[in-house]
């Protein structure tokens, strides 16, 4: 074998990290006597030849036969991992466009296929499972694969391997032509719905579902019985799924599309296994992250988990109720009962059930959240982070995490009087510019309610490092920050970078517009109209009317953010609706189809300011508040907040135009 390996011009082949000349050394290490080094080499091969997928590199066809020869050699310690690489490559080759598959791959796979079939009879169950997974990933015709899989099924006595075989049979029976064995396999799979083993029944549903999508809903009881049975742990030993309770719940939930809460409702029933209870909340979160309608059915069972003996379960229940916000406000008292609960998760931040409850009460604007937030600010190691985090809007997954502390308090202007000392304390001790910026933004968001923080901001305004953050906060506070006018004018007159911020803030706290107009004029002359400048011009209103022609031209800008801010600024300085309304309407058009982009929220709010002239846009999005699907672009709590904000903004627009 090694002579064949050395005869290949590996330097002429490519993988994810360039030249494939390192492949022979990795193959030799995979066969080496040190199991740990062999596994590391096999992992490196996965990274080099597959990485995150997306193509089949030229090194893959050349490496494939050697991967299978090593996998067939009993004393090679990395056999299982090498077959995992083969499975990934085989699967990716049928997923990506033909142009991304090396021309040599199809013939290499055709030659290698018989060697994979031989591995179905390996003495080690884990190798048989891995070979089964490879076959279940390929698109080779069923007439070639089904006979071998059926023979293995009849002889197989390893429970985990039998699960892999059921799934592989379900996949290969769809690969036409299936030959004479196709009808037999379909009958076999249907019969397995009545098998004595719960996990075989579950595997059968998964195997049949691609050809019969209605089956999972009809077999809901079977699914729930199987995924809640202790034998569900068997899937951890399979090659096709290889996951625990939460993974199996997630995998099975994907069979049931749409907003029906039945599966999640069943998972939320009490169970002696804490992992099952955690997973039930995870699935409820995944469903609620997509749809609003399941809330009524799932809410009582989520609330019931607030009294769970496990801290992780209590945390997740409270966190999910926080995401639901006002929809769960009738249960604020039950949530408040966790305020003293120091039960912690096993995560790095060790978030507590009390912190999740505090966040939930904050989402409901309940004053009982205030002491917990003040306490969190006093303890840097609290579960509330100091920096924001963003999570993808995965279609069927919910990230159970807490916001950063400033993200919580920024939405609580009604409690500014109680929270202001805490926020000012954070400004006092902030050594991180991002933290300082975040808490200044809190004061800006609170507006006039943050007037008590002006003395603190005056001190920051005198500091060359912190003055811009303070100026933005004062601008948000408005005329209640008039005490800062002289300092802001001094910053504006000093020249240098960002003086337009000081000049604009001076206008916002009650000064003369001339300084802001002059400073913004310099910025525009030097850099054009960056987005912050467009917002400042809008704040200046008719005083900035001389920019109208350039703003009007920018309402056709290809960048949606520029288009939206320019349209709003144009309306603010001229009350021109002929150019501004169509530009803003174009930004929200996708909202009617359930698409959500962050730029849409300011666009809807600007249309609301315009009022009745924005009626065409209002008619376009009139049905949005009744959409069942969540309107979001982010995952975790942020997606729920986006959904609430979008619907509130649209309702405000409708009210302004009706």
Image (tube, grey):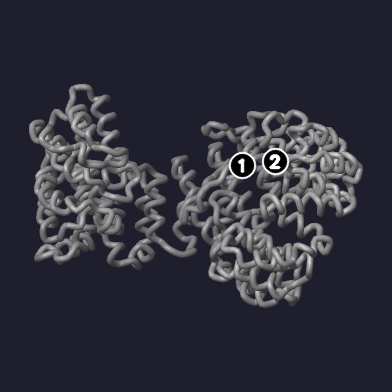
* Closer to the camera in the image, 419 or 451: 451
Q: Is disc 2 surrounded by few (<14), some (14 to 19) or many (20+) residues within 10 Å? A: many
Seen at 53% across and 37% down, the residue is 310
Seen at 35% across and 62% down, the residue is 216
Q: Is 508 situated left or right of 96 in this image?
A: right
Q: Is 218 situated left or right of 203 in this image?
A: right
Q: Position of residue 502 (x, y in %)?
A: 80, 44
Seen at 86% across and 54% down, the residue is 513
Q: CA distance from mark 2 to mark 1?
A: 9 Å
Q: Position of residue 427 (x, y in %)?
A: 76, 34
The residue at which mark 1 appears reads as 388
Q: Which is nearer the N-term, disc 2 or disc 1?
A: 1
| Numbered disc 2: secondary structure | helix
Instruction: Quarter of the image for the N terminus: give it.
Output: top left
Seen at 29% across and 34% down, the residue is 43
| Numbered disc 1: secondary structure | loop
- Residue 269 in view in this figure: no
The residue at which mark 2 appears reads as 438
* Closer to the camera in the image, 242 or 550: 550
- Residue 324 disc label: none
- Residue 236 in view in this figure: yes
Q: Quadrant of residue 654?
A: bottom right
* Closer to the camera in the image, 195 or 296: 296
Q: Is 361 situated left or right of 98 in this image?
A: right
Asked if disc 2 and disc 1 are in contact, CB closer than 8 Å, the reply is yes
Q: Position of residue 23 (x, y in %)?
A: 22, 34
Q: What count of labels does the image hold?
A: 2
Q: Is disc 1 surrounded by few (<14), some (14 to 19) or many (20+) residues within 10 Å? A: some
């Amino acid at each position: 074998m090694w002579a064949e390996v050395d005869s290949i011009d590996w330097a002429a082949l490519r993988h994810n990290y360039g030249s494939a000349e390192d492949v022979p050394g990795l193959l030799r290490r995979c066969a080496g006597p040190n199991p740990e080094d062999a596994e590391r080499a096999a992992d490196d091969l996965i990274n080099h030849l597959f990485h995150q997928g997306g193509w089949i590199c030229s090194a893959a066809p050349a490496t494939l036969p050697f991967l299978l020869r090593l996998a067939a050699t009993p004393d090679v310690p990395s056999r299982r991992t090498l077959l995992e690489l083969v499975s990934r490559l085989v699967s990716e080759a049928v997923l990506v466009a033909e142009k991304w598959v090396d021309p040599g791959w199809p013939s290499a796979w055709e030659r290698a296929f018989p060697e994979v079939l031989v591995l179905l009879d390996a003495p080690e169950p884990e190798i048989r499972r891995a070979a089964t997974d490879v076959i279940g990933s390929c698109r080779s015709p069923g007439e070639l694969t089904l006979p071998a899989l059926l023979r293995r099924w009849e002889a197989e006595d390893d429970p985990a391997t039998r699960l892999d075989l059921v799934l592989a049979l379900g996949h290969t029976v769809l690969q036409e032509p299936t030959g004479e064995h196709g009808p037999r396999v379909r009958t076999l799979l249907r019969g397995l719905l009545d098998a004595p083993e719960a996990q075989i029944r579950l595997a059968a549903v998964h195997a049949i579902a691609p050809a019969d999508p209605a089956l999972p809903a009809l077999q809901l009881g079977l699914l729930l019985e199987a995924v809640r049975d202790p034998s569900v742990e068997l899937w951890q030993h399979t090659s096709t799924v290889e996951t625990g309770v939460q993974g199996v719940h997630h995998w099975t939930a994907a069979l049931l599309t749409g907003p029906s809460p039945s599966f999640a409702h069943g998972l939320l029933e009490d169970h002696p296994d804490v992992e099952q209870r955690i997973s039930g909340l995870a699935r409820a979160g995944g469903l609620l992250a997509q749809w609003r309608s399941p809330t009524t059915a799932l809410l009582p069972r989520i609330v019931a988990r607030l009294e769970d003996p496990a801290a992780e379960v209590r945390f997740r229940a409270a966190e999910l109720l926080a995401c639901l916000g006002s929809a769960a406000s009738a249960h604020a008292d039950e949530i408040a009962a966790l305020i003293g609960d120091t039960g912690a998760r096993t995560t790095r931040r060790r978030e507590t059930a009390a912190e999740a409850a505090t966040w939930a009460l904050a989402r409901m604007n309940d004053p009982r959240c205030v002491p917990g937030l003040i306490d969190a600010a006093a303890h840097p190691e609290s579960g509330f982070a100091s920096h924001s985090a963003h999570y993808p809007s995965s279609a069927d997954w919910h990230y159970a995490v807490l916001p950063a502390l400033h993200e919580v308090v920024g939405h609580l202007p009604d409690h500014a009087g109680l929270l202001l000392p805490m926020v000012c304390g954070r400004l006092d001790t902030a050594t991180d510019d991002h933290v300082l910026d975040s808490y200044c933004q809190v004061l800006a968001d609170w507006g006039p309610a943050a007037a008590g923080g002006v003395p603190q901001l005056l001190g920051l305004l005198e500091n060359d490092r912190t003055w811009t953050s303070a100026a933005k906060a004062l601008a948000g506070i408005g005329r209640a920050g008039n005490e800062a006018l002289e300092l802001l004018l001094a910053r504006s007159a000093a020249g240098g970078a960002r003086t337009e911020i000081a000049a604009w803030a001076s206008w916002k706290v009650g000064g003369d517009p001339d300084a802001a107009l002059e400073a913004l004029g310099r910025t525009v002359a030097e850099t054009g109209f960056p987005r912050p400048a467009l917002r400042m011009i809008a704040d200046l209103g008719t005083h900035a009317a001389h920019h109208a022609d350039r703003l009007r031209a920018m309402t056709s800008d290809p960048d949606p953010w520029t288009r939206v801010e320019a349209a709003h600024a144009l309306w603010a300085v001229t009350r021109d609706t002929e150019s501004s309304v169509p530009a803003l309407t174009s930004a929200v058009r996708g909202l009617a189809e359930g698409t959500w982009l962050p730029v849409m929220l300011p666009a809807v709010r600007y249309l609301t300011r315009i009022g009745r002239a924005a009626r065409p846009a209002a008619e376009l999005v009139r049905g949005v508040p009744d959409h069942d699907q969540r309107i979001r672009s982010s995952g975790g709590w942020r997606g729920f907040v986006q959904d609430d904000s979008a619907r509130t903004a649209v309702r405000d627009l409708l009210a302004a135009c009706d």
